[in-house]
Amino acid sequence: MYRNIITDVFFDLDHTLWDFEKNSALTFEKILLDNKIDVDIPSFLKVYVPINLAYWKLYREEKISKDELRYQRLKSAFDALDFSISDETINILADDYIAHLSSFNHVFDGTFEILKYLKPKYRLHIITNGFQEIQVKKLKNAKINGYFDTVIDSEMAGVKKPNPIIFNLALKTAGANAKESLMIGDNLEADILGAQATGFHALHFNAHNEPKHNYCEMIHELREIKSFL
């Protein structure tokens, strides 16, 4: 479908290649145990995951700061469980979470297969809203950093997806043309609509079992990318 027009493929990282939920859960298992927080981890994760997504949306929309995101997502999760915990401990957990998250390296099924397939044919890049200090570590520790020519993050751009500034910076850094570029990501608002507004083609990796839409083609496994490229 895109084989004759695409020269550059841009990937989101978290929830698209890097299995954020799995790695995040393992990180919480470690840091809650290390800090002797006597909370049922499955119960904690059940409330934390949607809370985290909601706070990330506020962060993308510039409604909260990075520090507020890191603190409030934990505070809100413990409050939802009616679990008493001090602000000092929450801040320790927030720091420990960032420190250890990139040490877990699970990627989605098919990641290495599709990157090896694409690398000889296209220039590959990353556009991520994740925190700069850990995104490079994630790529390196998961052993996928070598596949990508450029990595653009929101702190580097000064804005977050779906702001067109980050997509235009990615194009400029990569030396790419939007009409010859494909964005692949899991978030409809940030990755798909943001990329399309900047002139990219887009492919939605449906990591969250979202309903079908007409904005672009949707895939449920990374291997399906072979049908388009």
Image: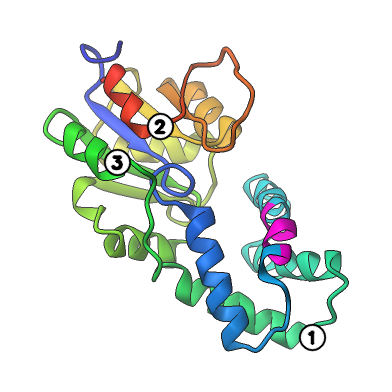
State which quadrant residue 4 falls in. top left
Q: Residues within 10 Å of mark 1 (few under 14, many from 20)?
A: few
Of the residues shown, which amino acid type is indicated by label 2?
Glu
Q: How is the image coloured?
A: rainbow
Quarter that holds the N terminus: top left
Residue 54 in the image, given as x and y percentages of width and height: 72, 49
Question: How many angstroms separate mark 1 from mark 2 (CA)?
Answer: 41 Å
Residue named by callout 3? 125
Q: Position of residue 40 (x, y in %)?
A: 72, 72
As measured in the structure, the alpha-carbon distance from the residue carrying label 2 to the one carrying label 3 is 19 Å
Q: Position of residue 25 (x, y in %)?
A: 56, 64
Q: CA distance from mark 3 to mark 1?
A: 41 Å
Residue beneath the point at 30% across and 59% down: 142
- Residue with the mark numbered 2: 221
The secondary structure that dominates the magenta segment is: helix
Magenta residues (range)? 43-49
Q: Earlier in the sequence, mark 2 or mark 3?
A: 3
Q: Work out whether 80 lies above or below 217.
A: below
